[in-house]
């Protein structure tokens, strides 16, 4: 097996959270190597222009910007925040929802900034934003709405409910010193708004990440199937019923009220691909 085949196999074994962190790290290296060694401004093709019309011309940056960082500090803090909150999110709401919320929060942050730029008609042609902050804040916001009272420990010292942690992070990353990186912080609002909306809808039993939410599934044609009288309901169906019951309990009473066994069942299920 070649090097690239081995690499492809190992990446497929990893979860989405790990892959997103790897993509962010790799693009950080490419951006800095291309700029400082080859004098090629790769960031011009990855960062999202703040100017509305420039962003339309570089439409792909609506996605690439949320995986791109130029400075090590920016990358480090975003990835730490993404890793710990992403693990919490996946442990409770599963990996597919995490992928959906991360990507759509990032896109929402980009669109929010573009609309802001369009209506204000600011001369920001040379400015651009980058980073996973809007996408990560969307993940945090969705979890804060879905499990607001879940206790978390900061640095193993301070314990607080997750909703207060989410507010603290939003204030630190967005509100404080708003005049610095204003464009990026405006995008944080868009990402957070989408996360709040997704979490609220999910708590109402409406999962925006499901195709069936947008398209009514076709009714299958009835047909007669002869089965053995001794056959029983598939094990996977009973497992799904257990998971649905646990998720329903979380939406009503919060993650913190799950029993140890229920938390273990949910965690094991979230590890399945």
Image (cartoon, helix red, strand yellow):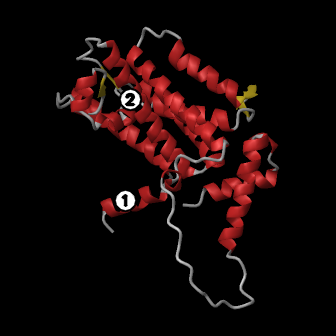
The quadrant where residue 181 appears? top left
Q: Which class describes the residues within 10 Å of circle 2: few (<14), some (14-19), or many (20+)? A: many
Give the quarter of the figure containing the N terminus.
bottom left
- Residue at 70% in and 56% down: 244
Residue in the picture at 27% in, 28% down:
55
Q: Is residue 78 left or right of residue 86?
A: left
Quick check: can you spot residue 155?
no
The label nearer to you, 2 versus 1, is: 2
Quarter holding the C terminus? bottom right
Please indicate whether residue 267 sits to the left or right of residue 103 in the image.
Answer: right
The vertical placement of 80 against 50, above or below, is: below
Q: Is residue 145 above or below residue 23?
A: above
Q: Secondary structure at mark 1?
A: helix
Residue at label 1? Answer: 8
> Residue at (74%, 29%) from the top-left corner?
161
**From what the image shows, is residue 95 above or below residue 115?**
below
Classify residue 72 as left or right of residue 90: left
Q: Quadrant of residue 44?
A: top left
- Which percent across, then down, holds residue 38? 17, 31
Drawn side of residue 242 relative to residue 72, left or right: right
Q: Which residue is mark 2?
A: 110
Q: What is the x, y in percent for residue 71?
A: 37, 24
Res 97 label: none
The Cα–Cα distance between marks 2 and 1, rounded to whole angstroms, is 30 Å
Whether the residues at callouts 2 and 1 have beta carbons within 8 Å, the answer is no
The residue lying at 49 percent from left, 45 percent from top is 100
């Amino acid at each position: 097996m070649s090097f690239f085949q081995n690499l492809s196999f190992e990446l497929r074994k990893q979860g989405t959270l790990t892959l997103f962190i790897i993509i962010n790290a790799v693009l950080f290296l490419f951006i800095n190597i291309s700029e400082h060694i080859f004098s090629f401004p790769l960031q011009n093709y990855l960062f999202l222009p703040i100017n509305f019309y420039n962003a339309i011309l570089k439409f792909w940056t609506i996605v690439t910007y949320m995986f791109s960082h130029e400075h090590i500090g920016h990358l480090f803090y975003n990835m730490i925040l993404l890793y710990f909150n992403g693990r919490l999110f996946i442990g409770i709401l599963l990996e597919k929802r995490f992928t959906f919320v991360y990507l759509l929060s990032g896109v929402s942050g980009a669109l929010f900034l573009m609309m802001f730029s369009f209506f204000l008609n600011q001369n920001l042609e040379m400015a651009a934003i980058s980073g996973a902050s809007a996408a990560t804040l969307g993940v945090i916001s969705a979890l804060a709405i879905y499990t607001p009272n879940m206790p978390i420990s900061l640095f193993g010292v301070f314990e607080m409910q997750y909703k207060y942690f989410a507010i603290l992070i939003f204030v630190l990353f967005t509100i404080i010193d708003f005049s610095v990186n204003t464009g990026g912080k405006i995008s944080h609002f868009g990402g957070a708004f989408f996360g709040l909306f997704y979490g609220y809808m999910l708590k109402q039993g409406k999962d925006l990440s499901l195709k069936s939410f947008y398209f009514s599934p076709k009714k299958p044609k009835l047909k007669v199937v002869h089965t053995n009288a001794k056959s029983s309901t598939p094990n996977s169906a009973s497992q799904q019923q257990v998971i649905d019951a646990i998720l329903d309990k979380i939406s009503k009473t919060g993650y913190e009220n799950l029993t140890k066994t229920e938390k273990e069942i949910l965690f094991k299920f979230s590890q399945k691909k």
